[in-house]
Image (spheres, rainbow, N blue to C red):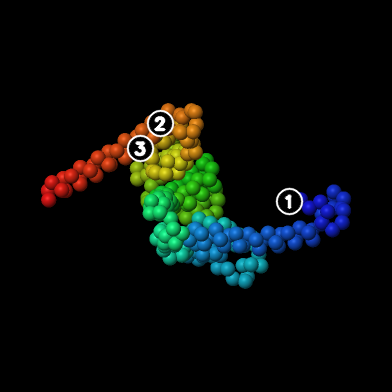
């Protein structure tokens, strides 16, 4: 926010660095409290602690900012140490908190279901290993993959922080935004960047055959469309909804069939 008259009027060519330094100190302390709250609400310690030390923070390193800034940036792609059983305890304590507030059992079950779905969503890409090509915008892809439990790396010459190379045989998905590659591996899927965003919007892992190199991508649907409120719903959205309803009905029929056969067997 601008401060037009900090102590006394100044000409436009002057800057009162004293006022700026005061507010920098204030915002620095405030952001520390904000980060503390955000990290602990996500189940991590603050200041962040890493599972392995990438660099040595000795006093000599602090004398030269440029000597370790690349290593500091590289830690952004490293796993953080989380508090033990943070998510499980959060789900188990939901019903206890609501019982004390006099909430109904249906309300408790609904919130527990939402908490379990959120926990499942956080591990959407867990067990998957991605590699980002140079032509793909790295920052948004990395944020999504890391936020949902996946591992990701890129060309080490493009930016610091790469944890593995393109030749790694354990890579499951390579994100590419071109039609032809000089070398490919049969052990991974080559997909276009939209697959990552569509999986997050649908909250499930989508088939990769519609996102192969050179393929005509499906419509990028918004996750915020309300079919009961909006006057127009894309046909692809209705098709996806019908398929989801069909799978739920099929699962319900199969469950009833198993229960019926169980009692007949008895």
Q: Residue at x 38, y 51 (%)?
A: 106
The answer to whether residue 204 is above or below residue 119 is: above
Labels 2 and 3: the sequence-earlier one: 2
Disc assigned to residue 244:
3
Q: Residue at x 46, y 49 (%)?
A: 145
Judged from the image, the secondary structure of the residue bearing numbered disc 2 is helix
Find out whether the residues at labels 2 and 3 contact each other: C-beta distance under 8 Å: no
On the image, the x and y values in percent for residue 167 come to 41, 49
Please give left or right for residue 64 compared with residue 19 in the image: left
Find out whether the residues at labels 1 and 3 contact each other: C-beta distance under 8 Å: no
Q: Residue extending furthest front? A: 102
Labels 1 and 2: the sequence-earlier one: 1
User: Which residue is labeled 1 in the image?
Assistant: 1
The answer to whether residue 179 is above or below residue 110 is: above
User: Which residue is labeled 2 in the image?
Assistant: 238
How many badges with numbers are in the image?
Answer: 3
On the image, the x and y values in percent for residue 213 come to 42, 35
Cα–Cα span, label 1 and label 3: 48 Å
Cα–Cα span, label 2 and label 3: 10 Å
Labels 1 and 3: the sequence-earlier one: 1
Judged from the image, the secondary structure of the residue bearing numbered disc 1 is loop
On the image, the x and y values in percent for residue 1 come to 73, 51
Q: Residue at x 46, y 59 (%)?
A: 101
């Amino acid at each position: 926010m601008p401060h037009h008259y900090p102590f006394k009027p100044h000409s436009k060519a002057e800057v009162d660095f004293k006022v700026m330094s005061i507010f920098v100190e204030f915002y620095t302390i405030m952001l520390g409290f904000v980060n503390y709250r955000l990290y602990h609400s996500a189940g991590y310690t603050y200041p962040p602690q890493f599972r392995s030390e990438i660099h040595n923070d000795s006093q000599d390193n602090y004398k030269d900012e440029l000597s370790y800034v690349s290593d500091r940036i590289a830690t952004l792609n490293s796993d953080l140490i989380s508090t033990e059983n943070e998510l499980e305890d959060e789900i188990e304590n939901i019903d206890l908190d609501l019982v004390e507030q006099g909430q109904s059992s249906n309300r408790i079950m609904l919130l527990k279901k939402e908490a379990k779905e959120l926990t499942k969503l956080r591990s959407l890409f867990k067990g998957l290993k991605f590699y980002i090509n140079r032509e793909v915008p790295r920052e948004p892809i990395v944020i999504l993959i890391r936020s949902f439990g996946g591992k990701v790396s890129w060309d080490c010459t493009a930016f610091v922080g790469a944890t593995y190379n393109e030749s790694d045989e354990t890579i499951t998905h390579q994100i590419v935004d071109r039609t032809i590659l000089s070398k490919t591996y049969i052990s991974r899927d080559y997909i276009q960047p939209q697959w990552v965003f569509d999986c997050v919007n649908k909250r499930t892992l989508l088939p990769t055959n519609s996102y192969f190199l050179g393929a005509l991508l499906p419509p990028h649907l918004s996750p915020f469309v309300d079919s009961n409120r909006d006057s127009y719903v894309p046909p692809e959205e209705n098709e996806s909804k019908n398929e989801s309803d069909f799978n739920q009905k099929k699962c319900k029929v199969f469950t009833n069939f198993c229960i019926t056969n169980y009692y007949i067997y008895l």
